[in-house]
Amino acid sequence: MNQLDFPILSLMMGLPMLAAIICLFVGAKAARWLALVTTLVLFALGVVLWASYDIGGPQWQYVERVELFGNFAWALGIDGISMMLIMLTVFLMPICIGASWESIQKRVGEYMAAFLFMEVLMIGVFAAQDIFLFYILFEAGLIPMYLIIGIWGGANRIYASYKFFLYTLLGSVVMLIAMLWMVQDAGTSDIPTLLNYDFAPEAQTWLWLAFFASFAVKMPMWPVHTWLPDAHVQAPTAGSVILAGVLLKMGGYGFLRFSIPMFPEASEQFIWLIFGLSMVAVIYTSLVALVQQDMKKLIAYSSVAHMAIVTVGLFAFNRQGIEGAIIVMLSHGLVSGALFLCVGVIYDRLHTREIDRYGGLAINMPKYAVLFLLFTMASIGLPGTSGFVGEFLSLIGLYKVNSWVTLVCTIGIILGAGYMLYLYRRVAFGELVHDDVKAMPDLSAREMALLAPTAAAVMWMGVYPESFMAPIRGDVGAIVARIDRAAPEGDAHLKMGEAKAATKGHEIETGHGESH
Amino acid sequence: MTIQLIVFLPLLAAIVAGFGNRMIGNVAAKFVTTAALFASCALSWPIFIDYIMLSRAAEVVPVLTWVQSGDLNFEWALRVDALTAVMLVVVTTVSALVHLYSWGYMDEDPDQPRFFAYLSLFTFAMLMLVTANNLVQMFFGWEGVGLASYLLIGFWFKKPSASAAAIKAFVVNRVGDLGFMLGIFGTFLVFGTVSIPEILEAAPAMAGSTITFAGMRLDTMTILCLLLFIGAMGKSAQLGLHTWLPDAMEGPTPVSALIHAATMVTAGVFMVCRLSPMFETSDVALTVITVVGASTAIFAATVGLVQTDIKRVIAYSTCSQLGYMFFAAGVGAYSAAMFHLFTHAFFKALLFLGAGSVIHAMHHEQDMRYYGGLRKEIPLTFWAMMAGTLAITGVGIIHMGAIPAIGFAGFFSKDAIIEAAFASGTSTGQFAFAIGVLAALLTSFYSWRLMFLTFWGKPRWIQSEHIQHSVHKTPETAEDSTGGYHPHESPMSILIPLGVLSLGAIGAGFLFHNQFIDATEGFRFWAGSLAFDRHLMHAIHEVPLWVKLASTVAMLTGLLTAYLMYFRGKDRPARLAATFQPLYNFFFNKWYFDELYDLIFVRPAFWFGRLFWKAGDEGTIDRFGPNGVAAVVASGAGIAKRFQTGYLYSYALVMLLGLAAAVTWLIVRGAN
């Protein structure tokens, strides 16, 4: 069956499903502990998955397949890309449960059940090998998130959850139609088979657009991003963590798994659209982030800008771009998740997200200030943190295709430093002026346990990203080989000149010799 | 193994001091960091001596894989060659001394472990920068020193001015980084590698090729070099991207000495020298570097003339001296640029630390208008500052007959630059020469002005609020302008670094000028680690006598003017300022760069941010998107009402976005 001789993926979906159901019927305390233990066990299973993953082995591993009816099958299996995203999910889930430990006091059982159910769906999305199974899990992800925002959210939660639902549903319908047509045309709903099926170029165009409608919203790309700030602001801390950490990655995963390898010609055809929207997103949302008064909104807008780097990287059609985009996805999952946790830490103390109510936290919360700074710097893309590796690779890949777009997107690094440091200054620097802020205690052991592992992961990915890049190398290679035929020509057009003599008319000793 | 120790000991110390913090206490944190730095320093000098003795070859020590992505590979590795060795001794020596100095200077600060941890972290990042064997590791160090600089400028983060200056430093540097990053991208595109030796080897073959960048057809090497140079401009505070450096003086004075004078700000010069074989392939890029360097030298000198804050005078002086280094590189005298970097590190660190000693003695007063007469009160500091001033103004006697040239450190390095500019024979070289001599005059003037205002004349301490706060008795007589305040000489931990750096300011030029810039010995010393133009270095000895004397004459003129104005004539400066009021204001307000940037960058950024948010997201996308759908569902009539308010905004925005889309379309389509 696979290298572990048991259906680990089904287990990873079944276990939280079971725990979710139990959570509905037990008390608050038991639900918390059950959820924590379950998510930790899943994390352990994730580590097993990663450790026994055969790098350089078959493209699809841990494959399971049970035929259900018609074209529909319970088909699971992962490649390196899926595995890293599953790792991200199982890493963030215990942190989400921990973040909700004290702040969620009403309907705890249902809350924990919603999160566990969400975990089932997220693992399923990344592991599904049947296009309909993917669709069901992908869309079902809406439901628990809708509930989390709608029930445990802030004051304006109804509007936010409505907006979230409306946006994401819109794209789904057209995507379903496209999927039905694809299965009809190719005669299979098996994703690995579809990945190597060549759709007619004319069909690709509308299929691509149909998928784009769904993925662009999930991403989110400008201008269908406005659901995100509202959803984040209203969601409880853990909801924001999982929304930014994993749900936003589904759009990128969709582009990578479906749009690009299945419709390479159409992807090339619509590069201008992706690049155009991404460029607008980088500049536009970065500037909007600069003027936010609400911490969560600020980070939400910064997410849109970061996700634009993912889209340009993916559509660079080359290895650096795609690998970079995947690393940005992983990195952003950790960093923005951690930033929302950082907001949650002080929100739990003061019950406001208004930036100006804080200030001087470096004085009474030094541990918090250090970790918040680390994540701020990772968000800015400081080398040595995960943010840099992804951003750098995406942009260097993009540069091979188009220098204009790279120039505009790289301006994002200036603006990113601007709004993040401006945020950090207003929160952590300055004098402690408000008495209630002065009374805030530093990180508790629980909060430390949530943030410290994330910080370690961010540094690990920044200093030695090879651990994360080795498993995806082969899969990215397969995608690049698949789309190579449609890869756009770069805009550089390097042309060698006449060999010139030494430029200054006299001999110059150059060279970088190793000896003298 | 030595090089790993040199680089990683400071990191280790930073981690211990930073995370140990209050747990291990002040003394332990200070001891660990200072000991690590002295160890690094002790290990660095033998390496440098080895290169001076020509008994060591270049080597690259791999540390760890970093990124492998298809044909893009770069690793963590430490490169050691003559160029690195020079930087190693500069960085570790100044850093070790600054650590020691901070024992005394930061003695009363409640947050000492954090301070020392930042200092050591900075040193680690700087060492990673100078040992980089590929562009990305250099960028790592580049950003690492930027982070440390941000943290240290904002060290007293309770002060709004300090945290504002910290952000400014980081963001302005990021503008430079935009160029650096695009330069790396372009280099990878053209050469298929980011390894520095490979790039330098392949660069000459690329001369004359053309490439499209952002829709423009350009000479490949020119655009690559210019992009990288933008990065250097940011880090080294060159004209246009210099605005952060004076504000960076918000940081504690030891920081100003280490980061904003001796080491970090010279990273741009180091980068140009490291990549000099690449820059040699583009005359246009070199011309730009020369012009920017020369312009910065003169611009910063003019502003330095009229500043009253002692640290700001020295900051503008640094900016100006960095300009010298750049135009030296621009005319092809990379070795002279590195030589000036080397000597400047000693005398400028000395001047800053000396200024710190004065500030320490004057109870944190930084305004020179409230100094005066300190010569007798703090004599050791005075003599150290004197050594620094003699070095920066370039006091020395040129080589005549059998008598070799003799002088202070700056004399050798600055004169070499000025002569090289003349000897280069190009018209930009002549321009740089003229500017260099004029800036030397101004340098001498503002340096002596600082000395006269601080150490000579009658005490003017009573006018200082800092002093008033510290003494609580009324002056005994109306004549007594000291306010009853008695400045004390600084403790040994401050005086020892001043003494060591004074030796450097006096002797570094005389001792090492042959190795650095002599046509024969220099060539053997550098051993290909930078582009060494033997003809040019030979030609600087052949320049006419008036050229050789020009900078000395300029120096004496500046000294005399400063003497007449600040030593003899007490009201002359004020009268002169009144006579040339507009010019004075122009200089005093730093050519209005800050105001200009605020007007054209900062305010519009916030204005557009609000516009996009209110009129874009809320006014257009939401209104016609989800809210619109809701409204349609709710009632058709509601929509008409919604249209009435502020539709002009939306209309303008839609037009703007439409335009942007159309342009995008044209560009992307056209390029393919």
Image (cartoon, coloured by chain):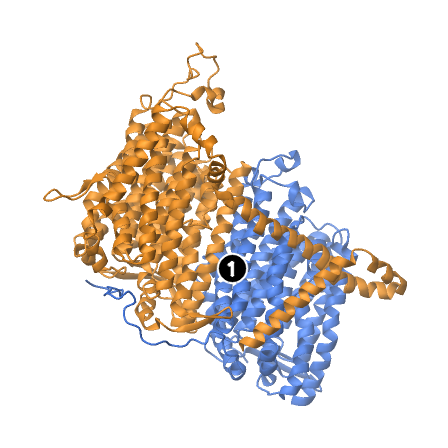
Chain colours: A blue, B orange
B239 w.r.t. A62: above or below: above
**Residue under circle 1?**
A387
Position of the N terminus of chain B by quadrant: bottom left
Q: Position of residue A52 (x, y in %)?
A: 49, 71
The x and y percentages for residue A439 are: 63, 35
Please identify the residue farthest to the left as the structure is shown.
B402
Which is more toward the observer, A298 or B358?
A: B358
Q: Is residue A22 left or right of residue B462?
A: right
Chain under callout 1: A
In the foreground, B637 or A322: B637
Q: Amino acid at mark 1?
A: Gly
Residue at figure coordinates x 25%, y 42% from the top left: B411
**Residue B236 vertical placement versus B457 (above, below):** below
Residue B228 left/right relative to B94? right
Q: Position of residue B481 (x, y in %)?
A: 42, 16
The image quadrant of residue B252 is top left
Which image quarter holds the C terminus of chain B? bottom right
Identify the secondary structure beneath mark 1.
Answer: helix
Judging depth in this view, the residue of A301 and B621 nearest the camera is B621
Which residue is outermost to the front?
Answer: B579
Of B185 and B415, nearer the camera is: B415
Q: Is residue A392 above or below residue A178?
A: above
Residue B179, above or below B352: below
User: Is B108 left, or right, of A7 in this rendering?
Assistant: left
- The image shows a total of numbered marks equal to 1
Q: Is residue B552 visible?
A: yes
Expressed as whole percent of the image width and height from the top left, the position of residue A97 reads 64, 56
Please give the name of the residue rendered at 32% of the width and 59% of the height, measured from the top-left corner: B274
**Residue A48 visible in the shown view:** no
Q: Residues within 10 Å of mark 1 (few under 14, many from 20)?
A: many
Residue at the (35%, 72%) spot, across then down:
B206
Quarter of the figure with residue B452: top left
